[in-house]
Amino acid sequence: MPIDAAKALAAEPRTGEITWDQKDVQLYHLGIGAGVPATDPDELRYTLESRLHVLPSFATVAGSGSPGVISSLSMPGVDVDLARVLHGGQTLRIHRPIPVRGTATATGRIAAVYDKGKAAVLVMRTEVADVDGPLWTNDAQIFVRGEGGWGGDRGPSARLDPPTGAPDRTVERHVREDQALLYRLSGDYNPLHADPEFAKVAGFERPILHGLCTYGMTLKAVVDTLLGGDVTRVRSYATRFAGVVYPGETLRIRMWRQEAAVRVAVTSVERDDAPVLADTIVEHS
């Protein structure tokens, strides 16, 4: 079996230093659609260095995400075909506000391996801390098709009961035609998001938007709409990637207020509300 769960879980963590500065933060914010309108005071908090704050989802690209998902897939006990790999979900826990510039230690390991029958699920955990202590913890849920069926633990269900009633707020966010080309400059250079021929080989009619770009766009919408633009209120943010987004489409983002949390559902307007992000929750102070 290409995945040896016991060996993968016992493998030594991989540790490396990451750094970022205001240019990395600004580029990330532009990559998720910030800066429209360019002179809006609320948008200048994402783009102008004298007012800059850091959207917590920047943690998914800080230091180019190293040690990242691809490197984790080459860890002991894991030998998989990248063509069978899907990014199934993402969970981010923020321990304190992310500074505009910093140097930190990122420690990556496989935190769990689940047997879903027709697929295996690897939970790739990255814990980041600086000299003042923990900053954030990122969990990427990676589906590896065709690698399940060994009788292992199925793991917890990622599905949540759907929110009830009409959403408290619904907003739409346009995805620019060049959004993926801009977002990839933050570190994810997978040709699936830029090369039409590669996208066709992968089974898509044209390049698709990075799931983590949609992830960032959605968190920004929640912060701007329901959290008063205060990025420091975000405590955690989890989602399941339910479908693709093509550059040029429009995201419909529905939000339901709950106690200390916001439930979110994201769909594509142009494809009859096809699901994009599901089981999405932002916990906040």
Image: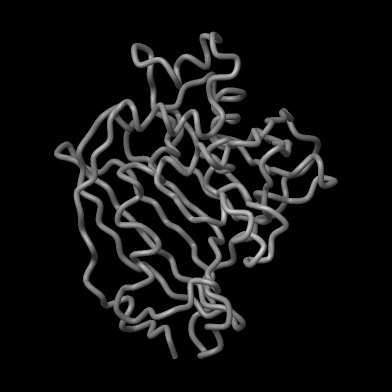
Residue 263 appears left or right of 170? left
Q: Residue at x 51, y 36 (%)?
A: 182
Task: Judge by depth and name the residue closer to the eye, 82 or 234.
Answer: 82
Q: Is residue 62 above or below residue 205?
A: above
Q: Residue furthest left?
A: 131
Q: Residue at x 14, y 39 (%)?
A: 131
Q: Residue furthest front?
A: 197
Q: In which quarter of the view is residue 242 placed?
A: bottom right
Task: Judge by depth and name the residue closer to the eye, 265 or 15.
Answer: 15
Task: Judge by depth and name the residue closer to the eye, 20 or 126.
Answer: 20
Q: Is residue 36 above or below residue 142?
A: above
Residue 178 appears left or right of 232? right
Q: Quadrant of the N terminus?
A: bottom left
Residue 213 locus on image (x, y percent):
54, 42
Residue 236 locus on image (x, y percent):
46, 42
Q: Residue at x 57, y 82 (%)?
A: 146
Residue 279 locus on image (x, y percent):
64, 52
Q: Residue at x 45, y 70 (%)?
A: 122
